[in-house]
Image (cartoon, rainbow, N blue to C red):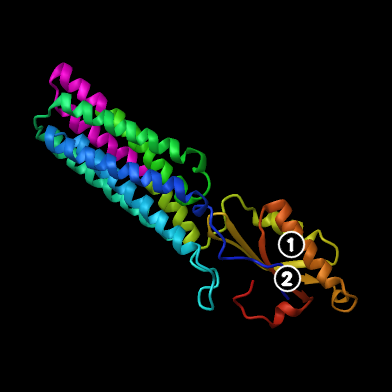
Amino acid sequence: MGHGHSHDHGAVTATGQHRGALTAALGVSVVVFAVQVAGAAITGSLALLADAGHVLADAGGVALALGATLLAARPASGRRTFGWARAEILAAAVNGLVLAGMGVYVFVEGIRRLIEPAPVAAGGMAIFALIGLAGNLIGVALLYRAREASLNMRGAFLEVATDAVTSVGVLAAAAVIALTGFTRADAIVSILIGLIIAPRAVKLLREAVNVLLEAAPADVDLDEIREHITELDHVTGVHDLHVYTVTSGLPVLTAHVVVDDSCFHDGHAPQLLDRLQTCLAGHFDVEHSTFQLEPAGHAGHEHPTHH
């Protein structure tokens, strides 16, 4: 037994609401990448090259997020009943993988340069690092307000913010080289960049994988939901309770609710469905819920996969 509320799966997603900020941040990232690659070639700085590689990974992640918002906005169909909303999570997973790969590369190359240092033009390195820092700070400002809107927005913001931090590190390395001639500072900063990238990539990947595996959202307590449902009048039990996330901002709940037999004879069923929907939306911010109302003993006739 379902409910009459309509659920629009083709609505604009959390990330899609900030498409303009993502587009602007992508443009800034592309410019910063080009400048830092040129700077690395001119100065011989591995730290600049590592920072440019990180910016490229970030730009790719933002581009993926933008592409995902276009797909996610497509309406549901007979084969894809939630439309393309999950595409945002797939983009977040790819984003995390790119970040992880970049972190490993920067760390390994930094170790090699630490063993075999190369000459670096500290003055030019500082100039290009300042340009990169300015661009990254613009990106941070563009994405700051939308950073908690979705996994993709959070990932994009963290990447740009990390770029700003690494640009500061490159500036510090340039200062050390200019003042002391210690060129290994360039390699040390590169290794630090790799260490900064890794945990953020792991966190983003873990969150994306949890959504893809349809794990219950971290802020949802299934026992508490079960308690709220069973406290309603005429409800005697609940089983086959599942809560998962289709995409950021779209949690879904399904449950089999055991009710008094009288509900099927005296017209209580529609009112009970309203109360169940209101309970979930009001207490747990779950707007999309589907309930099967059933009499006592019906569970014995169900397939073993229902539990």
At which x and y percent is residue 149?
A: 53, 47
For residue 170, side relative to residue 43 (left or right): right
Vertical arrangement, residue 46 with respect to residue 80, above or below: above
Vertical arrangement, residue 56 with respect to residue 212, above or below: above
Q: Are marks 1 and 2 in contact (CB under 8 Å)?
A: yes
At which x and y percent is residue 213?
A: 48, 63
Residues 129 and 286: in front is 129
List the residue tagged with mark 2.
Answer: 3
Image quadrant holding the C terminus, namely bottom right
In what element is the residue under mark 1? Answer: helix
User: Residue at horizontal 52%, vertical 69%?
Assistant: 83
In what element is the residue under mark 2? Answer: loop
Q: Main secondary structure of the magenta part?
A: helix
Cα gap from disc 1 to disc 2, whole angstroms: 8 Å
Magenta residue span:
171-199
Q: Is residue 213 visible?
A: no
Vertical arrangement, residue 202 with respect to residue 291, above or below: above
Q: Amino acid at mark 2?
A: His
Vertical arrangement, residue 182 with respect to residue 231, above or below: above
User: Residue at horizontal 29%, vertical 45%?
Assistant: 30
| Residue 178 is one of the magenta-drawn residues | yes
Which is more N-terminal, label 2 or label 1?
2
List the residue tagged with mark 1.
Answer: 277
Q: Is disc 1 surrounded by few (<14), some (14 to 19) or many (20+) residues within 10 Å?
A: many
| Residue 107 is one of the magenta-drawn residues | no
For residue 162, side relative to residue 244 (left or right): left
Hey, which quadrant is residue 181 in on the image? top left
Q: Amino acid at mark 1?
A: Gln
Image quadrant holding the N terminus, namely bottom right
